[in-house]
Amino acid sequence: MNPYIEILRPGNAVMGAISIILVALIDKTISIPVILAILAVFFETAAGNVINDYFDYKIDLINKPERPIPSGRISLKNGKNYAYLLFLTGTICGFLINYLTNNWIPFGIVIIADIVLYLYAYKLKATPLIGNLAVGFMTGFGFVFGGFSINNPTIIMTSIFLGFFAFVMTTAREIVKDIEDIEGDKADGAKTLPIMIGPKKPAILAAILIVIDSALCPLLYYYHVFGILYLVVIAIAVILFIYSAILILKSQDKATASKVSKNLKIGMLIAFVAFVFGSLI
């Protein structure tokens, strides 16, 4: 694969753009601002991946030497400039949405994303809990960005709810991943929450966040945002979420944390399917 495509982690960037697609499906609409929003999220996510690789250069020399920058296929300088170009492209997409809709909020969201993604790669990632919150925040922000790009008051409110759901569950999963990676993070000198205070309290925090999100899920049916099919499908995700919360409370070993992390990822995918089904039927 071409190193300039590989460093984007295109699969990851496409997953980020799916948040916009889901919001558009809920509104049953497609427009130039929606397409620009999809592109903006793709470029911003890709930019975040590249700037991460730039700042993680020394660590990746040891842990992931096959990546484009440590392997020498992309120079450090070119990697930084490439990230800046991607940030600029995403920002231009946000500005065009502003121009077409006369709504400054999507453009403002892109500017905030530029700042948070850069600060995360530069500093926040190594900060206990703040790094986890930053990842959750950016994941949830995608849905909110989609809602404001469509600029429909009902969809905006729905997108804020979906964004909050994604924020809380992603933060919980990031905490679980830190529990899973304690040994490797210690070797790299990282100061994650499980390293600073031990894995038990972070596991309790993750479980609380999972339960909160699970309890919120039926509200979208209760307030008639989604139909009965949403409730059926989301029940599967909720069962998986609660099971995962119980697992991480019982044990915080690497294997259990890995299993819980995968379960939460699968549960979130099921939840996104529920959002789509609930909006279509």
Image: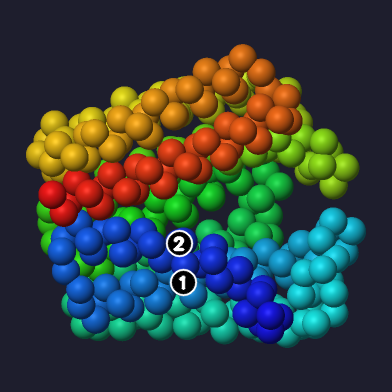
| Percent x, y of residue 195 | 76, 31
Residue occupying the point 53% across, 50% down: 135
Q: Secondary structure at mark 1?
A: helix
User: Which residue shows up at 79% across the image and 42% down it?
Assistant: 185
Give the number of the disc on residue 42.
1
Give the CA distance from mark 1 to mark 2.
Answer: 6 Å
Whether residue 193 appears in this view of the structure is no
In the image, farthest residue toward the top: 250
Which part of the image, by quadrant, shows the N terminus?
bottom right
Q: Residue 69 lies in what quarter of the image?
A: bottom right
Type of residue at label 1? Answer: Phe
Measured from the top left, where is residue 174 in percent x and y? 58, 41
Give the residue furthest to the left.
224
Q: Is residue 94 left or right of residue 219?
A: right
Q: Residues within 10 Å of mark 1 (few under 14, many from 20)?
A: many
Q: Earlier in the sequence, mark 1 or mark 2?
A: 2
* Location of residue 141 in the rendering, given as x and y in whole percent from the top left corner: 39, 55
Residue at the (16%, 69%) spot, across then down: 29
Determine which residue is flagged by label 2: 16
Q: x, y (%) of residue 32?
A: 24, 81
Describe residue 265's horizontal placement relative to residue 272 as left or right. Answer: right
Q: Of the residues shown, which amino acid type is indicated by label 2?
A: Gly
Q: Is residue 224 above or below residue 200?
A: below
Task: Note whether 56 is above or below 191 in the view shown.
Answer: below
Q: Quadrant of residue 181?
A: top right
Q: Is the C-beta separation of discs 1 and 2 under 8 Å? A: yes
- Depth check, front residue: 188 or 265: 265
Residue at 45% of width from left, 77% of height from top? 90
Tell whether 147 sits left or right of 42: left
